[in-house]
Amino acid sequence: MAASKKKPSQLAEKFISYLGCPCEIFAGLEDDDEMVGAYKEAVEDGRANGYIPLLIIPDETLFEQITIDFVDDSDLGFDPAEVASRRIEILKDAENVDAKACLDDLWLELTEGENSENYEPGPVEGDNILSYFSSYWDYDTNRTMEVILARIPAAHPWELAAWMPMGGFNDCTTPENQVAVMKRWHEKYGAMPALVASDAWEFTVPEPLSDKEEALKLAYEHYAFCFDRVEQYGRDEYKTGNLADSLMKSTVWYFWWD
């Protein structure tokens, strides 16, 4: 049976009920080419047919995050009007968010009370190249987890953060802030939110950055948005300059909140 024809789990069915849009399921793949190919085809098709695709990794934590304000009637599912109202509220709140000021504030929160030398950029160099999605891999089985490919009828890519309002926990900023920042990054760099999990967002960009200074500025924005992107990379010597170098070589942006 083709992966795209797999039957959704009960949890995935709940996500699909909440979203109320066409979805298909991929799971247990040893090679993600079929899923990534389907996503890329959906990107092209979505431009012509008024939707934006998003890969979603369904788990209980993410489900609780996005449905915290709603009751799921086991017979009727979620009330589409209530879900849409909450989405509209997030988008309206995001209109009042200055994305640059938001990132500056997050940076101040990060560096306040710390030794300034801890945040020196270091050299713009490294070997971290991201050109593929990674959040959906189960490294115990070396297969993909269950993934929903949702065709979301959003008008703009940044609205996906309102359709899947994760965040507002620990150091992951709120959905309205995410919407504003995603809008900024889409307009400046063409960044498209492509994958969401309970603790991660992944984006695609049409091409890596070419200007070193611009890459360094963006690296500080990434660091402010998700400090684990630098601090939890796995090597103590990894600095903002290394992230800037990665942005000059990568077509995928990865954010993960521990």
Image (cartoon, grey):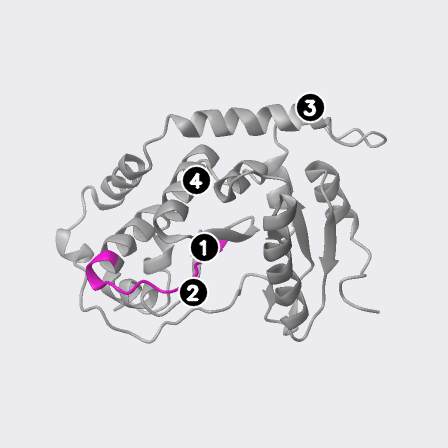
Image location of residue 185, percent across then percent down: 37, 47
Please give the residue where the numbered disc 3 appears in the rendered image.
Answer: 81
Please give the residue where the numbered disc 1 appears in the rendered image.
Answer: 256
Q: Nearer the viewer, residue 16 or 112?
A: 16
The magenta-colored residue range is 201-214
Quadrant of the image containing the N terminus: bottom right
- Give left or right: position of 52 versus 91: right
Mark 4 or mark 3: which comes first in sequence? 3
Of circles 3 and 1, which is in front? 3
Q: Are marks 1 and 2 in contact (CB under 8 Å)?
A: no
In which quarter of the view is residue 140 placed?
A: bottom right
Please give the residue where the numbered disc 2 appears in the rendered image.
Answer: 251
10 Å crowding of disc 2: few (<14), some (14-19), many (20+)? many
Image location of residue 212, percent across then percent down: 22, 64
Mark 2 or mark 3: which comes first in sequence? 3
Q: State the CA–CA distance, disc 4 to disc 1.
A: 14 Å
Mark 4 or mark 1: which comes first in sequence? 4
